[in-house]
Image (cartoon, rainbow, N blue to C red):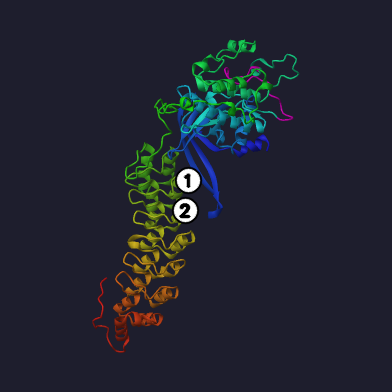
Amino acid sequence: MDDDLFAEHFKLDVTIQGDISRQTTFTSDPRLGIRQRKTKTIWRKGRELYDDKVYVESTTAGDVRVVKKVLQKKETLRNILSELRVMGRLSKENGLFVQLIGWFQSNNYICFAMEYCPLGDITQCFEDPLSEVDARNIGCQVLEGLTKLHEIRIMHRDIKPKNILVQQRHPIWVKISDFGISKRVIDGETEARTQHGTLGYMAPEVLFGPLDDEAESSAYTSAVDIWSLGCLLHYLLTKEPPFKKLDELNRYKAGKAFPEEELSAHDIETSGRRLIKDLVVLEPEKRPAAADIDIMACWKIVNPARAISMPGTPCTGQTNGTKVNQPPMRVEKPHQEDSMDYYSLELWHAINNPSTSIARVTAILEQGASANKFLKGLTALHLAVQHGSPAQVELLLEYGADANVKSRPYADTPLHLSTEQRDIRIMELLIDWNADVNAQNADGDTTLHLAIVKGCNLAIIDLLLNKGALVDIIGRRGMTGLQYAIYLDQEDKVRLLLKNCDLNHGDEEGRTALHYAVRSSRTSLDSIQLLVEAGADVLKEGHNSRTPLHEAVQGKRREVISFLVERATDYANRYPELEKDVKRALAPNVPLTHKLSWGFGR
């Protein structure tokens, strides 16, 4: 893939106005038949990390990323494309390298959007020298990343503490970042010759050129990264690089012994000191390769107990100086109102007013308002699905509204509440945005239960069933959707609900759908026949030992009694007293006003 195609692959659709970045993305979901769906995300600039060229952006939903701005000039374009290409090639190695999210343009700058590591770099996260165990652990992870880089013929050329970011502290997990001066060296491409890196971590051949004055080439190799790794390990153990000043490196280059004083002062064992000296040997060809699996194995820690960092060692990270021991965690408080910023509060009230125009809602969202903030137990999307328009609902979803957010404390999702308005277009929108059709609220009701309770039409019931709604989920009083429909005399929905349904499920009182059907004077014989032919048990007992046939006799409907008796051929043996009542009920010209031989109570 050439540079232009590679760059286009990672390009983000972002427009910037002041401290706000508006990003448009398009996603597809073949499972739901969605070819292309547009989503808008508002990112707001936060604090600067190093200078105004590197800063944090966040959304009201809690997503965070880092943006790095690089001045776009003709002479820097090649380096920009090189960094983009390197980060793109490493995008699958998300455990080793800080991930590239994408890039976008802003005036004269190219902006790289990258993964956010909450604990900052090594200099920010660890105030004190590390133990040998922790330093070796970090060294192994950096070495693993260098091995991957060197396999694809890429030199990082700037391994240093500020370019090693901490993803997690316990256990330690670090990632390599900043590929701005990395170099890819393959046949046919320019060799690495220019001076790049950071003093204190830069190999001597980069600073001074090759040691051999008779060398035919001034190019250097991936061994420069191994030198930097040795300097990094020295820093981890002592908080200082081995050569803080250029004249110290010059003396080492002139033949002075490697300075071990700081390592000895920190009680670093002999094998650790020897490893660092092997990594920073002057001759590049004598340094081990990153792929040499024995590099770190030779670091033997004889007394691990002494070499383990004491618990409670502070990690300041990027938290404005507040010391923490682990990354912050968000704790959900389901029965408390959210802290509302001005625009999110304005959005909530705008949606709560059905006359608010789409243009007004869009303007508020463009200011970074969150559609997921709670007020009075509801979000803006909860309000919109109850009395707003499909256009309002779609707009909120495009700007990041959560289609499955639950109200407080009743746990109703937007799809649940959409049954109030009974607008199938709104329900289709929510389902297209992955709303869970089988989510249950605090009462146990699903959208299917509520659609029946609210009297939604057959088209809505059919939509829910086609989108995976399960009929047998238990709602209030232990009832299924089919039982709801019959209990509420919505006979028109029975045929749709019969498919894949347990017809003999009993509710809290053990009553099945057939119990409810024969108890109601409004349920037609056709529907009762439909239930029985589909498998409903005529003699299924409830908790009071009464069967649907008992209920039919009590209901005094001769045609229903006759039909059930035909299907319950052995009822007389099981219920002798019921047999007498059935015969009496079916006797010609005998009114059903006699006292039954068994009691009845609804």
Tell me where residue 564 appears, x and y as whole percent: 38, 79
Residue 53 visible in the displayed image: no
Q: Is residue 249 visible?
A: yes
Which residue in the rendered view is the most extreme toward the front? 302
Outermost residue toward the left? 595
Marks 1 and 2, the one that precedes in the sequence: 1
User: In the drawing, does residue 193 fall left or right of residue 325?
Assistant: right
Q: Is residue 176 above or below residue 370?
A: above
Residue 399 at what x, y percent from top left? 46, 43
Q: Quadrant of residue 324?
A: top left
Give percent across and percent down for residue 517. Answer: 36, 72
At 60% from the left and 19% from the top, the residue drawn is 277
Percent x, y for residue 175? Answer: 54, 31
The structure residue drawn at horizontal position 44% and vertical position 61%, both measured from the top left corner, is: 470
Using the image as rendered, state which of residue 204 and residue 482 is in the foreground: 204
300 with respect to 421 (left or right): right
In the picture of the structure, the residue carrying the numbered disc 1 is: 398
Label 1 crowding class (10 Å Cα cut-off): few <14, some 14-19, many 20+? some
The alpha-carbon separation of the residues under discs 1 and 2 comes to 11 Å
Which residue position is annotated with label 2?
429
Q: Secondary structure at mark 2?
A: helix
Specify whether residue 344 is painted magenta.
no
Q: Give the residue displayed 46% in from the left and 25% down from the top.
A: 306
Q: What range is drawn magenta here? A: 186-204
Secondary structure character of the magenta stretch overall: loop
Secondary structure category for the residue under label 1: helix
